[in-house]
Amino acid sequence: MKSLLETADLRKTYTVGKIEIEALRGVDLRIREGELVAVMGPSGCGKSTLMHVLGAMTKPTAGKVFIDGQEISGMSDSELTGIRRDKIGFVFQKFNLLPTLTARGNIEIARYIHGKGVASNGHDQHLREILQLLMIEGKMERKPSELSGGEQQRVAIARAVANKPAILLADEPTGSLDSKNSEVVLNMFRELNRRFKQTIILVTHNPELVAFTDRLIEMRDGVIVSDNDSLSWDTENELAQPARSV
Amino acid sequence: MNKQMIIAGLKARPVRTTVSILAVALEVVLILVVVGLTTGISDETGRRTEGVGADILLQPPNSSLFLALSNTTMPIALRDKVRELPGIKAVSPVQTLVNSSSGLEIIYGIEPDTFNAVSNGFIWHRGRLFNSPDEVVVDDIYAKSKGVTVGDSVELLNHKFKVSGIVEHGKGARLFVSLKTAQEMTGQNGKASMFFIKLDDPDRVETTIAEIKRLLEGYGVIPLREYARLMMSNNMPALDAFISSVVFIALCIGVLVIFLSMYTTITERTREIGILRSLGASKKFIVTLIFQESAAICGVGALIGIGSSFVIARTIMAVFPTLTVLITPDWIGKAVVFAVLSGIIGSLYPSLKAAKQDPVEALAYE
Ligand SMILES: Nc1ncnc2c1ncn2[C@@H]1O[C@H](COP(=O)(O)OP(=O)(O)OP(=O)(O)O)[C@@H](O)[C@H]1O
Ligand SMILES: [Mg+2]
């Protein structure tokens, strides 16, 4: 199975004044195509930092990051921008949407940035399915302020996956939702993963989420302390792996 | 798509958008009305001077084509020398007076006989020529704007004059007194500030000018037909400096307002910019977006400014009939360029600052 994301001894250090904060202290990680991975850990352990690096939002201080085969640590700003545009979908905890645009406008701007606005018919079909799945087809003409928090997050998810990104990264997407809405949104991530084989990495504080995911990575103090990766990375055995349920 | 975003962005901040648009409109109005007034007045003065109907204007050395700025004089006796040249039909000395207590009124001190000879005479609306030192002839526009008629008195240069007659406008000045009165008022007895010269054959203008130049070295000699054009194109450094200052101030207003508007916009929208960057929008995309937004403000502002300038020009001319506001296509073009320029200069720093923002930091901003 192809490895879509890979990091080797990934480090990220923030310098605030004279103090150095080691947010990531050697992360080794491999994510396969089609996986739904949850990342958990106490506050400040580096989850968001990891997501930002994996999403080509910022460069690592040391170590390597391969996104769909491309190593980003030596990339220029415009190359990183290209990776974000072509490979990544991002969902944040809150304030994901551009407040002046409607839900439709928010999705269209992403498609415009991605492909200069030329959408193929197949693309439209894909988008329709996503909107159906997320149950927001009827809300497309509303502004973010006219949507509930859960609906806003679903629009943000639709926008993130509208361009069929290789990887969908979500940093506490349910962090500002009540438990009912959280469940709806999390279910949708799972559906996206099952139906479209969307690779997803989710940061969460919600222990219930574990039930939704194939794989749970736990972090502490900038390193991975546990990873219940049940599948072998032995390349020779890759073809022998049982097909995951869809 | 950009368009949709820009319009949505502008609509979301209606007060700021309106104020910015009005500031750009003000910039354009300031340029068009002030330039229109100065060029209008000089253009109108030029036309009126040409309207005297003479062929050649002779002025003493170092005098200005912009008659109001000139107080040089020459002896009237020079007239006899000029008259000796071949083909001269009439020479009319004129002493100008400038009454600046209400606007800038030029008064011609004329010799009725010779002035009529070069100008083919006044067209009379009412009354008659002055025949005493405290009588003045005014043109119809002056009479209308000041609400005076024959028999009324007007105060000019601290003298009380009685209006003796009203003539059709277009012959040099709006006010005429006798040459003698003008000379006495300026203390320049036997002198004049210019000669209007009429030829037997108008085709001999160039030759005669050459002859006069040979005769009176250093004197200003120009064909009156070209007076307005020459007056507009040179000899007015003071006016040019004035216009440049007004344009500069207007441009500064535009730049500052656009700067402030765009600067607050990007600070307010830090997060939005972060979202766009996270979606893969390039720095160029952000810069373009901000420039397009300011272009939209400047474009609408310029249009409103041009429209308002015409309205203001009309109002000025209706309220003050002696003033002319000349809005030329040339200056409309320039005003638009200045509006766009203020947009570009004003957005330069904000757009670069926005593009430089780190997407992660921008997203952390709340
Ligand atoms: N821009 C920054 N500048 C300086 N330090 C930072 C910055 N961003 C994060 N940090 C520090 O890096 C460490 C990891 O932060 P990070 O945001 O990745 O944690 P997290 O696991 O996402 O926490 P939370 O669950 O609270 O969101 C923290 O100690 C944090 O203070
Ligand atoms: Mg975090």
Image (spheres, coloured by chain):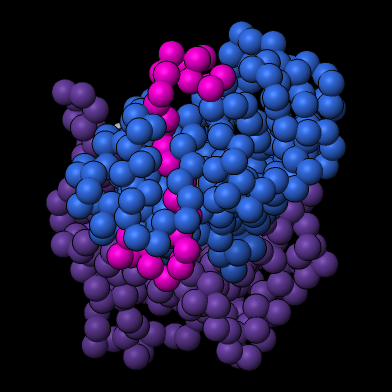
Return the residue nearer the eye: B142 or B350.
Answer: B142
- Residue B80, located in which quarter of the rendered image? top left
Where's residue B163, x and y in %? 77, 24
Q: Is residue B53 above or below residue B105?
A: below
- On the image, the x and y values in percent for residue A148 come to 76, 48
Tell me where the magenta segment starts and ends, as one range. B180-208
Q: Nearer the viewer, residue B101 or B304?
A: B101
* Quarter in which the C terminus of chain A is drawn: bottom right
**Which quadrant of the structure image shows residue A42?**
top left
In the displayed structure, B265 sits above or below B224; it is above
Quarter of the picture holding the N terminus of chain A = bottom left
Residue B119 showing in the rendered view: yes
Residue at image coords 74%, 53%: A143
Q: Which chain is blue?
A: B
Q: What residue sits 32% from the left and 81% below the top?
A: A2
Q: Is residue B304 left or right of residue B37?
A: right
Image position, residue B261 (x, y; %): 53, 37
| Residue B259 visible within the image | no
Q: Residue furthest top?
A: B158
Q: Nearer the viewer, residue A137 or B65?
A: B65
**Which quadrant would residue A54 be assigned to in this image?**
bottom left
Magenta span has B198?
Answer: yes
Give the left or right position of residue A5, taking residue B304 as reference. left
Indicate yes or no whether the magenta region holds residue A75: no
Residue A65 x %, y %: 23, 63
In this view, B241 is above or below B150: below
Q: Residue at x 70, y 46 (%)?
A: B122
| Chain letter for the purple colouring in the rendering | A
